[in-house]
């Protein structure tokens, strides 16, 4: 069974757990899934084995603490040590898929915004793309995403295996970071001067290019070819 189907089966079977056992198991599951260097296939197979073992024990009147022990993080760490690493040829397409998906959305948003903004300005909005400012802005966006992913994962990890974790506080932290990042990107877009080489790129060409790229990525993901 492929990882995608294992995840779907895992979601279905977890509904049979008691609230206490579900919390215990979900913390371990999320903790293991956050280890992005591990083989997704092997991780999901082990998680399914653990879930089946827990369900069998639950049917016998046992709790997750009785089956896996009182140190779920330590138990999960032992599992992580024995799981194989993800192959680079699988990690690289995954990361490329994220970057290209971001590019497709940026192009489509640009294609929509140019004619919309033009309706509220006396002078037509320029459609030329300046290479250097665009690269700087794109680098800033990628950096914000990379740091954001690290920050969100760090926040999630700190909330696991803890009874004192506050979901509302975590949401406020993530929301604040998102607002600051968006403000920084908007400021950079607005105040970066136009300099260096440029080339014409109309709104409709931007919209079509972004849409075509998004469709290609969607189809590749649907049929599990190329980018994941």
Image (cartoon, grey):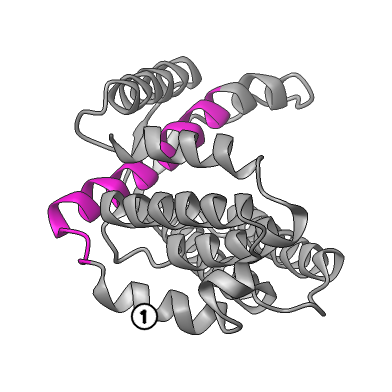
Q: Farthest front residue?
A: 60
Pointer 1: residues within 10 angstroms few (<14), some, or many (20+)?
few
| Quadrant holding the C terminus | top left
Q: Residue at x 46, y 79 (%)?
A: 75
Residue on which disc 1 sits: 78
Q: Residue at x 50, y 42 (%)?
A: 10
Q: Residue at x 79, y 75 (%)?
A: 165
Please tell me whether residue 122 is drawn above or below residue 54 in the rendered image. above
The image position of residue 43, as x and y in percent, is 34, 57
Viewer-proximal residue, 113 or 182?
Answer: 182
The image position of residue 13, as x and y in percent, is 56, 39
Viewer-proximal residue, 202 or 82?
Answer: 82
Q: Is residue 214 visible?
A: yes
**Residue 33 included in the magenta stretch of the image:** no
Main SS, magenta residues: helix
Q: Residue at x 56, y 57 (%)?
A: 57
Q: Is residue 144 visible?
A: no
| Magenta residue span | 84-111
**Residue 98 included in the magenta stretch of the image:** yes
Quarter of the view holding residue 22? bottom right
Please tell me whether residue 11 is drawn above or below residue 171 in the rendered image. above
SS of the residue at dot 1?
A: helix
Please tell me whether residue 152 is drawn above or below residue 17 in the rendered image. below
Q: Is residue 205 left or right of residue 17?
A: left
Number of numbered markers: 1
């Amino acid at each position: 069974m492929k990882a995608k189907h294992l995840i779907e089966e895992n979601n279905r079977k977890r509904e049979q757990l008691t609230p206490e056992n579900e919390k215990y198991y979900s913390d371990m599951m999320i903790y293991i899934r956050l280890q992005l260097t591990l083989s997704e296939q092997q991780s999901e197979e082990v998680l399914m084995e653990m879930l089946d073992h827990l369900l069998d024990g639950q049917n016998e009147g046992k709790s997750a603490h009785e089956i896996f022990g009182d140190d779920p993080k330590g138990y999960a760490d032992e599992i992580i040590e024995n799981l194989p690493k993800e192959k680079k040829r699988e990690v690289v397409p995954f990361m490329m898929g994220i970057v290209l998906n971001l590019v497709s959305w940026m192009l489509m948003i640009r294609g929509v915004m140019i004619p919309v903004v033009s309706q509220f300005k006396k002078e037509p909005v320029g459609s030329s793309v300046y290479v250097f400012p665009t690269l700087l802005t794109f680098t800033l966006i990628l950096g914000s995403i990379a740091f954001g992913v690290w920050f969100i994962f760090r926040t999630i990890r700190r909330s696991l295996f803890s009874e004192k974790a506050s979901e509302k506080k975590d949401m406020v932290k993530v929301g604040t970071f998102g607002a600051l990042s968006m403000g920084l990107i908007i400021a950079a877009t607005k105040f970066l001067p136009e300099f260096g080489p440029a080339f014409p790129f109309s709104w409709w060409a931007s919209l079509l290019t972004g849409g075509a790229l998004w469709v290609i990525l969607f189809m590749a993901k649907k049929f599990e070819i190329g980018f994941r």
